[in-house]
Image: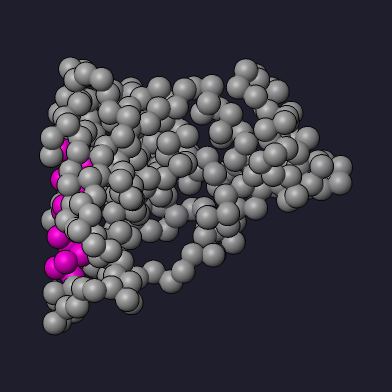
């Protein structure tokens, strides 16, 4: 890899060589000592996915498992290499799901629209835990453990993740989206504190279709764009969220308050101390 670029082989469509590039790279090397925090849940899904029409054929199931393990190692090393080119990384922490996520007890529909898990995912999870030193997010999500690590590191970190929820909760710190697609190998991103507050407040209203979190029914992104802006205070954001839910619930204050608490409780990311207090 040179200058954040890597070349892949010929595409199936002909002789064209695709050059995948790490986008929005920092202009210079940052000497600040940092930790690298990786939300690796998406890597497990990427590594374990083999489409039915895939050109890859495996003589045995063990060969398929070994390929998934190879993909996992390769992606983690790719992330490490791309980030270390620009940041002084002293330690790396890898987080994956650990089961018994409390969110399922708050919202029964949580992630109910997800397809059945690939049978390889638990195998790769065990591999990451036992061989690669990953840390399980017991009782919560990897997102929560990543968020906690950013707080503990006091922002002296680089976060690598694909999840927008993690991105929204990482204001003013280096963030690397490791999703590879088309000509993009990965992308460095930044979100300001003001942008973060607006994104989180808007999400409470809009919800998250990917996780089956409903938000304020019938009140969507267009309403948020019209009624929320970067310079609002916490009180103004709270009032706007309540206004959206009152609109959704035809003025029913108690029902609106109940839905806001439930949806925010599921959407919010928690530190480990906050998780401990939830369980008391």
Most extreme residue toward the bottom, as rendered? 59
Give the total of numbered labels.
Answer: 0
Q: Is residue 245 magenta?
A: no
Range of magenta residues: 65-82
Provide residue 258's location: percent of width, then percent of height: 72, 46
Residue name at image x 73 percent, y 51 percent? 217
Question: In the image, 132: left or right of 170?
Answer: left
Question: In the image, 70: left or right of 225?
Answer: left
Question: In the image, 180: left or right of 260?
Answer: left
Which coloring applies here?
one colour
In the picture shown, does residue 239 fall above or below 113?
A: above
Residue name at image x 67 percent, y 33 percent? 225
In the picture shown, does residue 110 fall above or below 151?
A: below
Residue name at image x 33 percent, y 72 percent? 51
Provide residue 248's location: percent of width, then percent of height: 79, 46
Image quadrant assignment for residue 151 = top left
In the picture shown, does residue 59 fall above or below 261?
A: below
Provide residue 128's location: percent of width, then percent of height: 20, 56
Question: In the image, 18: left or right of 168?
Answer: left
Image quadrant assignment for residue 59 = bottom left
């Amino acid at each position: 890899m040179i200058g954040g670029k890597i070349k892949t082989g010929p595409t199936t469509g002909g002789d064209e060589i695709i050059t995948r590039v790490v986008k929005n790279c920092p202009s210079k090397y940052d000497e600040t000592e940092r930790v690298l925090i990786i939300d690796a849940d998406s890597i497990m899904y990427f590594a374990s996915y083999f489409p039915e029409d895939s050109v890859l054929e495996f003589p045995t199931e063990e060969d398929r498992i070994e390929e998934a393990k190879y993909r996992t190692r390769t992606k983690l090393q790719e992330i490490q290499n791309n980030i270390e080119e620009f940041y002084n990384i002293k330690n790396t922490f890898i987080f994956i799901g650990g089961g018994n996520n409390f969110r399922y007890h708050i919202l029964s529909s949580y992630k109910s629209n997800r397809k059945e898990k690939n049978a390889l995912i638990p195998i790769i999870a065990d591999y990451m835990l036992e061989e690669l030193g990953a840390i399980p997010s017991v009782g919560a999500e990897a997102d929560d453990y990543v968020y906690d690590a950013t707080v503990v590191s006091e922002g002296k970190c680089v976060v690598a993740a694909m999840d927008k929820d993690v991105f929204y909760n990482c204001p003013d710190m280096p963030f690397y989206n490791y999703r590879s697609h088309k000509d993009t190998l990965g992308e460095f991103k930044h979100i300001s504190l003001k942008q973060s507050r607006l994104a989180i407040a808007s999400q409470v209203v809009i919800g998250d279709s990917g996780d089956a979190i409903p938000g304020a029914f019938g009140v969507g992104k267009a309403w948020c764009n019209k009624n929320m802006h970067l310079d609002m205070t916490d009180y103004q954001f709270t009032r706007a969220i309540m206004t959206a839910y009152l609109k959704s619930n035809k003025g029913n204050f108690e029902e609106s308050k109940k839905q806001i608490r439930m949806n925010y409780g599921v959407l919010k990311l928690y530190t480990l101390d906050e998780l401990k207090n939830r369980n008391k």
